[in-house]
Image (tube, rainbow, N blue to C red):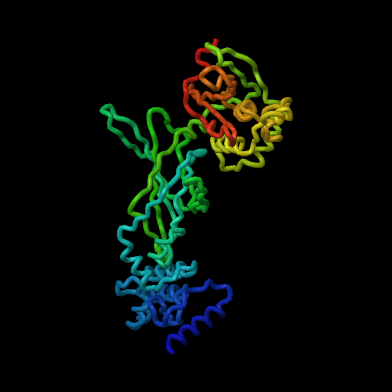
Amino acid sequence: MRKAMAAMTALALTVSAVGALPARAAETHSLGDCNCDGQVNASDATEVLKYYSALSTGGDVWADDKVRLADMDGDGKVDSTDASHILGYYSAVSTGTDITPEKYMQYRTKGFGEFSYYSSIEVRAGNGCVKIKANDISADEYLQQQYPEGVTSCAYDVSVYRYTANADGTEKSELVCSETVRDIGKGERVYRYYGEEYRQPVDVFSAALPQELETKGCSYRVEVRGHYKIGGVEVTAANTSTAALDTLPLIVNNAKLTPHDAYKLYNIKVNPPVYKATYYVTAADKKILDDFAAEHFTPDMSNYDKIEYTWDWLNKNVTYASGSLYNDIISDSWVSACFVKKKGQCLQYNGALAEMLAYMGYDVYMLEMWLNPDGTNQHFRAEVVIDGQAYSIEVGNNGSYAGWLWLFRPIESSIKDLK
């Protein structure tokens, strides 16, 4: 009967408190319920602070029973720390955590021991930042069963290390930068397994990177340590998750760009290679590229992201123009054929991306080549030079030639012996 009365009292108080956050209905005289109203909320914290302030001016001392209710941390006294614990508990239950005040304080004072969570992370260099995806712990059914009071992520420590080789062949690591990130979004990781596509919920966040990172003769790894709230109490994982940071996006994003309208075609079917023609990015082509960018690019995308997105889009959205289909684009620019009519062959696929790269300011050129070692099957491909290093690009098409697909593959320049 006493429990029923307490529940009814809690319900009545919750309904009458217009606009207030619902606190967890607790047993009368439970820990933290120092005003004995059946709830632990901000009113109890206020009463504790008033009492603590009054004590310094000779106010009345609470009875032992009331002190035990208000003494959240069990140190034998009632002070501002107890008020802080009450507010922490109130915040936890106001966001849906189902936990008793006693259990909450047990977590606060004794922690969770060596709490570990092994997350698969993905890292990508962006504009002055590293973008990271980590497993969403709140979607881990096993952990949610282990902690029915709820487990969520609240922050991540992100550290970036540079690795270089010592003279004796050993590896040396150096901390480049570190940051604790609390701005966390939600997304998903898409992957294929045995031909099936799977989607996994992930946390999405980013940390700052130095604008100029050395990319020659070294490698980078990103180390991530999660902060999680269990029952409203923050705990830092005992373990870290690591992943290699691909330096290629850094190289592409940091390239010195000179926007230009012309790009050349070289014939490498002969040895040495020879210049064949010059193509131009016309005003009409720029308009098409600008419209594509406005529709598909987002403000957080780096140059590498934009190029990769376009490369993937061309592969998946442009139909290979075999036979009579080619007649519809024979007079079109590569950009018009691919982005407007969505038709093309190797010349249009790779030429459209080359025009975009030229418009952006990259040192890009086209190659006329034989696809087969026996000097048959003419093909066209693009190359880009960044800081003296050549990179091959192949867009291909999403059909019988879908294997012809790579982006910024480092190679020896195909025109190094240009006549």
Q: Residue placed farthest to the left in the image?
A: 168
Rendered image quadrant of residue 89: bottom left
Left or right of 16 on screen, residue 78: left
- Image location (x, y in percent) of residue 229: 41, 61
Q: With respect to residue 266, does 30 lie above or below?
A: below
Q: Residue at x 44, y 90 (%)?
A: 1
Q: Does the image show residue 183?
A: no
The count of marks equals: 0
Rendered image quadrant of residue 287: top right
Rendered image quadrant of residue 349: top right
Q: Does the image show residue 280?
A: yes
Left or right of 412 on screen, residue 307: right
- Image location (x, y in percent) of residue 212: 46, 33
In the depicted view, which residue is nearer to us: 41 or 49? Answer: 41
Q: Residue at x 53, y 71 (%)?
A: 21
Q: Residue at x 33, y 62 (%)?
A: 112
- Image location (x, y in percent) of residue 263: 62, 21
In the depicted view, which residue is nearer to us: 178 or 242? Answer: 242
In the depicted view, which residue is nearer to us: 107 or 281? Answer: 281
- Image location (x, y in percent) of residue 293: 64, 38
- Work out which quarter of the rendered image holds the C terminus and state it: top right
Q: With respect to residue 34, does 239 lie above or below?
A: above
Q: Residue placed farthest to the bottom in the image?
A: 1
Q: With respect to residue 64, does 348 lie above or below?
A: above
Q: Residue at x 61, y 19 (%)?
A: 265
